[in-house]
Amino acid sequence: MIGAILLVASLYYAPWIIRTLRKWIYQYPYVVKLPGPKGLPLLGNMLDLAGDSTAPMKFWSKEAEKARAKGDGVFCMTLFGRVMTFPLNGEAVKSICESTEELTKGKDYDFLHPWMGKGIVFAIGQAWRDRRKSYTPIFHNRTMLEGYVDYFNKHARVTVEILGEVKPGSTIDINMMLKRYSLDAICESSLGFTFNVQRNPEHPYILSVDKFAYYLQRWTNEPQMWITWIWYALYHYTGYKDCLDTMNRLTQEVLDNRMAAVKRGEVDLDAEKRPLIDHFIAQYEKGDWTYEELHLECNSAIFGGHDSTSCTLTWVYWALATQPEFQQQCYEEIYGIFGDSDRDCTHDDMNAMKFTERFIKETMRIFPPVPLIERELGADFQMGKYLLPKGSEIFIAPHLVHHNPEVYPDPFTFDPDRFLPENIAKRSPYDFLPFSAGPRNCLGQKFALHEMKTIVSWTLRYFSFHTDRKLLDQEMRIEVVTKTSLGCHLQVTPRKVKK
């Protein structure tokens, strides 16, 4: 019986084994010349990554330090036949980020395809260029950005109201609060509709998004999930499919309602201030997008617009709470702009928050929200003096680049002045990568910074945040985004009563 099972398994996996061996035979002569840890046959460096979700970043940081000590600008590791090269400085990153040919995302993004299809996140070639062109006006037009800020203000007011209901001096889970704020803000700015999860935390949409992210993290970190039949038998139909179905159904309901409103003449698709969904529907009406693409782009906007933003905000509030002197500087700047008023934050206010922006950027340097940016090479690729083989993958880990002591002296010291204009001018733009860089950089970075400045300015007007912990007590858990290893429970103290 056991022999029969092994025979069937070997026949089933024979094509994969043959492909892997062929690829490895081709790549091996390259791999032996690249700096980095030498792993076990087939398993590669799997045992080095074993442990909880903080283990990968610890391992990568250790290897980056070893490589730099030897004067190397990259290191390479292997895992189950996959060859992964990590660039360690802006010059190495520049070579891949500026490539107009090597734009294919890595294998770990495959999990997201059923939710987001081949839209802006995954498209390559001319399809990606066309989609990028259609998106650019959405995020670079001041009037459009001002419209999005209206939504940010609306939901930031709700956050302040919820914090005002907390007993003074109580400790709250700031991460969940910010996740709900971000989801409400992105849903209304992208779909023109809010699920109101700040006031309805058990809403099926946010529960499904959280569970979907959990399955994505497991799929990325647990190699048994890469085996198709195990994935389908143990995970796909036990949770993943339910999450996907729920999210798609709710997006479909919102999309159908919006398109019905367009047909009734209740929505102006050409309005200067409009949610993203109206721009998407306009592309569909012109025949540039299919209905499926329209639906998938709505999903992409939601996922891309809330998870990394809420993660960044969690780190920002952690940095505020652990460094009261910087929190005070942010508060004084914000008070200088708003005084005792409870007026909305405007686009001009954003430009006036110079120190607060530097504080946010320094937080993203030390705790970048995205753990990895992956590319799969379609041809041999020259990265400085290193030749990387076709079929291998480049893993850009912003944390490793952001902690290069040659660019950021004393890199674990928190210093917002690193982002003064004169200091930025001394660095390569590829030395700071929270939004990636080059042709495939994040189009929504202004959008995200506006959203973050809005909620920070609203909450600091009314509350201060405290913890007995120190900034670097937190380690980074590698999931879909980088999460805090200790959670983020902060004490909240009112500054004044909201009018």
Image (tube, rainbow, N blue to C red):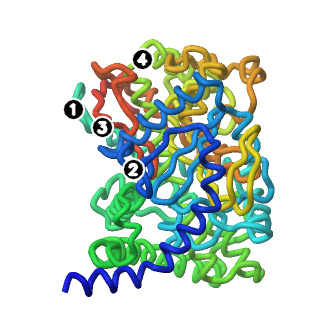
Residue at the image point whose x is 30% and y is 30% from the top: 490
| Residue under numbered circle 3 | 487
| Residue under numbered circle 1 | 167
Circle 2 sits in a helix, a strand or a loop, which is it? helix
Q: Is residue 450 visible?
A: no
Is residue 135 or residue 77 the one in the foreground?
Answer: 77
Residue closest to the far top: 325
Q: Is residue 425 above or below residue 38?
A: above
| Residue under numbered circle 2 | 46
Between label 4 and label 1, give the one nearer the viewer. 4
Q: Are marks 2 and 1 in contact (CB under 8 Å)?
A: no
Dot placed on the residue nearer the N-terminal end, 4 or 1:
1
**Spot occupied by residue 200 in the image (x, y as percentages of width and height):** 31, 58
Q: Mark 2 belongs to which amino acid?
A: Met
Circle 4 sits in a helix, a strand or a loop, which is it? loop
Q: Quadrant of residue 321?
A: top left
Q: Mark 1 belongs to which amino acid?
A: Lys
| Residue under numbered circle 4 | 323
Residue at the image point whose x is 66% and y is 69% from the top: 278
